[in-house]
Image (cartoon, rainbow, N blue to C red):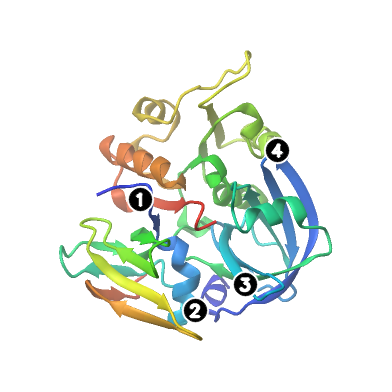
Amino acid sequence: MSDDRHLDGNAVGGLLLEIFGREMTAELECCGHCRAVNPVAAVHVYLEAPGVVVRCPACSTVLMVITELESSHRVTFEGLRWIEPTKW
Amino acid sequence: MAGAAIQRRLNWAITEVVELLEESPRVRSVVLMSPGWAGHLSGQHIDIRLTAEDGYQAQRSYSIATPEEGDLLTITVELVEDGEVSPYLIEDLQVGDQIEIRGPIGGYFVWDEALGGPVQLIGGGSGVVPLMAMLRARVRTGSDVPFRWLSSARSHEDLLFQNELDGMASRDGVTVTQTLTRSHPGDWSGPTRRVDKAMLDEYTWPPGDRPLVYVCGPTGFVENVATSLVEIGHGADLIRTERFGPSGR
C-alpha cells in the first residue's frame, strides 16, 4: 500500500513524547492484524485526517488514532498489538 | 548524554533568533539560541509553535541542520506555498524575534559516531537538512567513518549547502553526488535525472559493504528510493527513512 498523503512516525515523535513522556520513535510496534514488527518511526501517519491516524506500513491496518481534546489527547488503540521499548 | 537528551520531558521553550541565512530563493536557515538547551543528536528535529494574536496556534516540525553546539541550533526551512508556518519563518522573521520550540525529538533517524558506518545519505529537496547535520557532525568530531552523499534537487539554484558540500567532498572519506532533475547549467557534470537503481549502483555504497542508509525527502521520493535499495540487495533493517510533507513541516 502506498500513497503520497502519508508521512511517517517521525512526524509524530513530538506528539508521542508529549503523551507518553518518552521518546517512542526508536521503539518497536507490532500490528495486530498482519503481525509485522516495525520501528514506530516507520509507521504511516496521516495528519490531515480528523485526528492523527497511524497505520501499519505493511498492511495499512489502523493501529492508533489520536484526537485532540480540550486540554489533552485521547489515544484510541485500534489494531496495535504491542509497543516494546527495545531500541531499534 | 544522549540518553538524558532523549528521555527528558518535553516542554515548550522560548528561543531567540540570532542569525538568518538565505540558502536559496526558497530556503532560509534560522539560527536559534535556546538557553539551557540539553543538546541533541544529528538527525533529530524540533517542533515550532506560532501563536496568532487571536490565540490561533499552528505547529510544524523542522529538522535541526547542525550538530550539538551549546545553546545554538539551526533549522533550515523551505517555503511551502500557502503554508501556515514557513512563509512567516522565511518572509517575516527577524533577528531578535522570539519563537516557541520543543525538542529535541526523535531517536530513530539519528546518527552518531558510535553507530559506525559506512554511512550513505540520500536526500530529496529539503530532505537534505537532517543529513547535513550528520555530515557536519562527522566533520566536526574528526570522525573517519566513510560517508557518501547523494541528493536530488530540481535546479542548480535549489541546491542547498553547495559551497560547504564542495569543501567536504575534498576530504578523505566523503564523496558527494548531486543530481538535478528539472534543469541544469550547461557545464553541469553530475547526473540530471531522478534517483533510480542505476544511479544508486553507480554512486552509493554497494549492499556488500552493509552501509547504514538514511533516506529523507518527500513521501514519494523516500518510498521509491527505499524500494530500490531493497531491490538491489540492501537489508531493510539498515535503511532508516524520514518522510516530510506540507502538513508536517
Q: Which residue is mark 4?
A: B25
Instruction: Identify the image quadrant of residue A48.
Output: bottom left
Crowding around mark 4 (Cα neighbors within 10 Å: few <14, some 14 to 19, many 20+) is: few
> Disc 2 residue type?
Glu
> Disc 1 residue type?
Leu
Query: Residue A58 versus residue B51: which sits nearer the camera?
Result: B51
| Percent coordinates x, y for residue B101 in the rendering | 64, 70
The answer to whether residue B38 is left or right of residue A11 is right
Of marks 4 and 3, which one's residue comes earlier in the chain?
Answer: 4
Instruction: Identify the image quadrant of residue B188.
Output: top right
| Percent coordinates x, y for residue A10 in the rendering | 44, 61
List the single residue furthest toward the right.
B96
- Calculate the distance from the C-alpha at mark 4 to the C-alpha at mark 3: 29 Å
> Disc 3 residue type?
Tyr
> Disc 4 residue type?
Pro
Say the numbered circle drawn on residue B56: 3
- The N terminus of chain B lies in which quarter of the figure? bottom right
Disc 1, SS: helix
For the point 74% across and 62% down, the residue is: B32
Disc 2, SS: helix
Above or below, comparing residue B230 to residue B72 in the picture: above
Q: Which residue is mark 2?
A: A18
The answer to whether residue B27 is left or right of residue B22 is left
Residue B144 seen in this snapshot: no
- Calculate the distance from the C-alpha at mark 2 to the C-alpha at mark 4: 35 Å
| Percent coordinates x, y for residue B129 in the rendering | 58, 48
